[in-house]
Amino acid sequence: MPLTLVVLALWALAFLTLNTVVSVRVWRIRRLPRRRRALPGLLLCAGLAASLSRATGTTIAAETLAFPLYVATAAIGMFELRRHRARSSRLDDSGALT
């Protein structure tokens, strides 16, 4: 097996792990509405379903949808985490950190 293929497989596994961790962290933020908490996880599941569609022979859907859904999962999840951290570090009305 060529080294390039191994590196690509490791990168894909790391990216999938990042998406899973981000989705779980966003799901645990209780201040978010339920639909915003669920969005990264749903996008990840849709991307996984598109990737698994290769097994049935529909490679066009997998090639078209899977990677953009994974990128959207990471982007939306990181946005929600950053936004939550920025809100948590601001002072609330009583002057104490939240």
Image: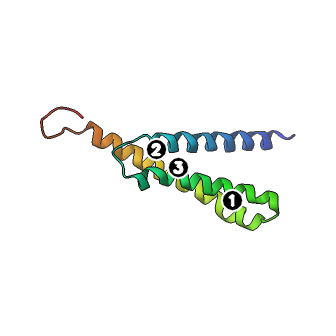
In the shown orientation, is residue 32 left or right of residue 19?
Answer: left
- Which residue is labeled 3 in the image? 74
Q: Nearer the viewer, residue 93 or 35?
A: 35
Q: Is residue 71 visible?
A: no
Residue 96: % across, % down: 17, 32
Outermost residue toward the left in this view = 94
Nearer to the camera, 4 or 44: 44
Q: Which residue is mark 1?
A: 50
Label 2, secondary structure: give it: helix
Q: Residue type at mark 1?
A: Ala
Is label 3 or label 1 in front? 1
Q: Is residue 80 above or below residue 49?
A: above
| Disc 3 secondary structure class | helix
User: What separation in Å lies between label 2 and label 3 (alpha carbons)?
Assistant: 13 Å
Q: Which mark is residue 27?
A: 2
User: Residue at 53% of width from left, 56% of height from top?
Assistant: 72
Label 1 secondary element: helix
Decide: few, some or many residues near mark 3? Use Cα within 10 Å; few <14, some 14-19, many ≥20.
Answer: many
